[in-house]
Image (tube, rainbow, N blue to C red):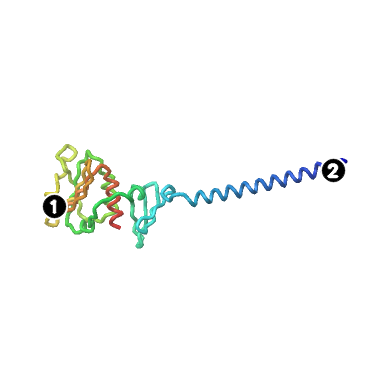
Amino acid sequence: MRMKQKPPKAQGKSRKKLYIWFMGFMIIAIMIGSALDLWKKDDTTEGAYEYKGLKFANTDAGWVAYKADNTQVWIMTNPAELANMTVPYVNTAMMRTYGKLYVTYNPKERVKVALNQFFKNIPVPQLVVPACTVDIDECKDSPIKNCTDAGNGVGVLLFKEANETKIIYEKDCLTIEGKELTKIVDKMVLESL
């Protein structure tokens, strides 16, 4: 007995149906796979991180968050990298109380980005005087200042590259030392929130 074969036209329709079902299944599988992958991703790799209730977003200029009063908080370092870093608490609000603040550092050291971060986020008095910690050619037009010059309404902010991280605030002088000064200042900013 001979089996009936489907006419060629009917065979083409079933292949087409199979192809449509296969493509539909593939699209659904890709969508489910993508959704599961997005769900498990860490926010820090995507450019967002939450710290003390503030959501930091990664931008070309660093990481930014907005306080409840719409004030911006800018840091250069990924907040996730700073989560396990510890720095002592410094009442940076005291910096505003000085009539004059000397900002002193060695221009041959890499401190300018850290200084910028400090001034971007921490309020200081209106009268800020750049100074140097050493007497070199780059400082011929600047006063030489250190912590002994602080007091009587005059503050000193001293930045210094060093192997050991230190943040000391005593007798109207804030000293910030370390290898990665920008990270140190960024952590200070986060701790002051």
The C terminus - image quarter: bottom left
Asked if one can make out residue 126 in the rendered structure from this viewpoint, the answer is: yes
Residue corresponding to mark 1: 150
The three-letter code of the residue at mark 1 reads Ala
Mark 2–mark 1 distance (CA, rounded to whole Å)? 104 Å
The three-letter code of the residue at mark 2 reads Lys
Residue 117 horizontal/vertical position (percent): 29, 49
Taking the spot 16% from the left edge, 53% from the top edge, the residue there is 170
Viewer-nearest of labels 2 and 1?
A: 2
Residue 44 horizontal/vertical position (percent): 41, 49
The N terminus - image quarter: top right
- Report helix, strand or loop for mark 1: loop
Q: Is residue 99 above or below residue 20?
A: below
Asked if one can make out residue 161 in the rendered structure from this viewpoint, the answer is: no
Q: Residue 4 — which label? A: 2
Along the viewing direction, whichever of 92 and 25 lies nearer the viewer = 25
Report which quarter residue 142 is drawn in.
top left
Q: Is residue 43 left or right of residue 105?
A: right
- Report helix, strand or loop for mark 2: loop
Q: Is residue 43 left or right of residue 152?
A: right
Q: Residues within 10 Å of mark 2 (few under 14, many from 20)?
A: few
Hey, which residue is sitting farthest front in the picture? 1
Q: Residues within 10 Å of mark 1 (few under 14, many from 20)?
A: many
Taking the spot 78% from the left edge, 43% from the top edge, the residue there is 11
Hey, which residue is sitting farthest top in the picture? 137
